[in-house]
Amino acid sequence: MRLLFFLLAGLILLFGGKPAKNTGIYLEKGSQLIAYQLTGDKGKVSFEYLDEGNYKISVLFPQQEGKYIKDKPKHRTLSKASYNAKKKTYYYQGNEGYFAIKFSGLSRIKSENFNAVFHEEKNGEDTYNVILQFGAHGKNASISVSVEALTAAQFKKATDKATNISTLSIPNIR
């Protein structure tokens, strides 16, 4: 039984990313910032009790180190941002490293108003990445965001089957 536990734990560490703590998650309604949270040790944040309206989520990624920033020629990818709609997972590659952002706990958010986007906004030295626009229908809508740091190999494998959105232009909801 112990051997099985260690085997499963090793597989999870081998194929999954590590939680990206201290990732800044910004929630805006229209052009007004209504919430800001840093991810905790598990790389997660939740926004609950949202009113009806149009929202966007922006992310300020922390700088990664070691294997989470290095890539090898066989793992190079041209994708800057990709989205897997089936898994509701957004993938991002930048100077900070490789990341997977998973959306869950969606309540009162319709699929047709849930759009992954790629738009970078600069403010001084910081680059904020607008990654999601969504519409909440009715009161008490909620969304949870989980951020993981990936290696270049994990990123390449995940994005090979995802839709590349870094070349798409989607207008902001205002």
Image (tube, rainbow, N blue to C red):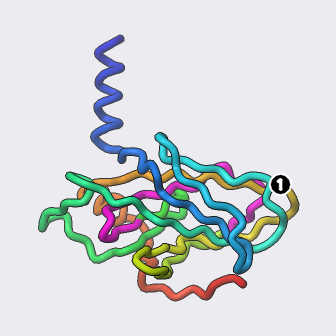
Q: Residues within 10 Å of mark 1 (few under 14, many from 20)?
A: some
Q: Picture quarter containing residue 166?
A: bottom left
Task: Please state which amino acid type lies under the numbered disc 1.
Answer: Asn
Q: Picture quarter containing residue 32?
A: bottom right
Type of secondary structure dominating the magenta stretch: strand
Q: Where's residue 116, x and y in %? A: 56, 72
Determine the residue positioned at 65% across, 50% down: 46
Q: What element carries label 1?
A: loop
**Magenta-drawn stretch contains 111:** yes
Q: Give the range drawn in magenta.
A: 92-113
Direction left: furthest residue? 73
**Magenta-drawn stretch contains 9:** no
**What residue is disc 1 on?**
140
Q: Where's residue 142, x and y in %? A: 73, 54
Determine the residue positioned at 68% across, 71% down: 33
Q: Picture quarter containing residue 78?
A: bottom left
Q: Is residue 83 left or right of residue 93?
A: right
In this view, the residue in front, 91 or 63, is 63
In this view, the residue in front, 35 or 146, is 35
Q: Is residue 98 left or right of residue 118?
A: left
